[in-house]
Amino acid sequence: MDTLEQRWARLAPHITMVGPEDDRRRPTALLFHGCGGLRDHLPLYAEAATAAGWRAAIVDSYAPRGWSREYAMATVCTGLQFHGDKRAGDVLATIRGLSDHPLVDPERLVLAGWSHGGWGIMEAMSAECSRPCLGVADPGAVSLKGVKGAWLAYPYVGIGAWNRMRAWRHCPKVLAVIARKDHLTTVRNAERVHDMVRGCGAEVETWIAEGSHSFDEPMNAPPMRHDSALAEESRRRFRAFLEDVAPI
């Protein structure tokens, strides 16, 4: 089992940093892709972060593991392996690693996850680990204090997310995107989960987008369908959320 330092060493070569071209420590959004891996919409969100004066780190969880999109679709998206609790180890390791980056303000971080990435973030926020868990040997070796916000885009909160109703131990500001036509959860279930997070003391805003799961991803794979207008609105809300969390 990796330590956080070892996990970060594996992830770091596969992280894309974007942002204003200066040497200031800036607030930074950590972007975690869905179960299908990196897709073309995440760089657009990174551009939105840059426009807000933030930096963005796009985290590829699959390249360090040697997994192709086809392999991930067949094993991760089907729930055969790498559940959200294991993805949470990547979330913690990235917080730990980027907190030492000379261009990152470790006191102003936002975790942003799409589908499986959102699941991983929610597991990282809720797990109480005094011993090895979340796929890493020393999960308690990183502080969540600098995490000021969480953007959860149609996070997976279906039956396989066993811990979806477990209280969060760290409660930053949250913007949760619910897809009205999501085939993986009902709106009622998603709202129930986000109400639980709200009950833990977090400020939670929800937006019900009138689209399918992954509506902002440039693909059409029924029942998922790309909606360019909703995608643009989602990026606008993402930028506004960052500006609200930490104005520049």
Image: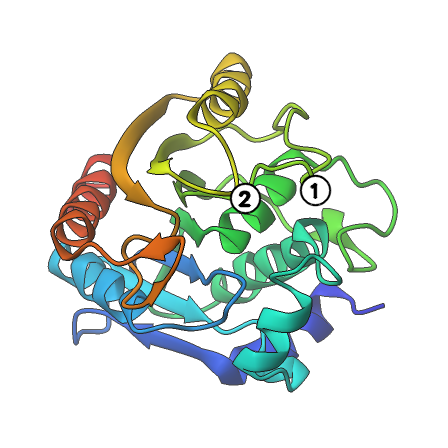
Element type where label 2 sits in the image = loop
Element type where label 1 sits in the image = loop
Tag 1 residue: 160
Local crowd at mark 1 within 10 Å, few (<14), some, or many (≥20)? few
- Against 26, residue 191 (above or below) is above
Residue 235 or residue 131, whichever sits in front: 235
The single residue placed furthest to the top in the displayed view is 199
Residue 22 x, y percent position in the rendering: 18, 74
Q: Which mark is residue 156?
A: 2
Q: Residue at x 78, y 60 (%)?
A: 136
Image side of residue 246 versus residue 73, left or right: left
Residue 20 x, y percent position in the rendering: 17, 70
Pointers 2 and 1 in contact (C-beta within 8 Å): yes
Image side of residue 218 versus residue 213, left or right: left
Image side of residue 233 versus residue 127, left or right: left
The single residue placed furthest to the front in the displayed view is 222
The answer to whether residue 25 shows anywhere in this view is no
Q: Residue at x 63, y 79 (%)?
A: 71
Q: Which residue is drawn at 50% across and 47% down?
A: 118
| Amino acid type, callout 1 | Gly
The answer to whether residue 9 shows anywhere in this view is yes
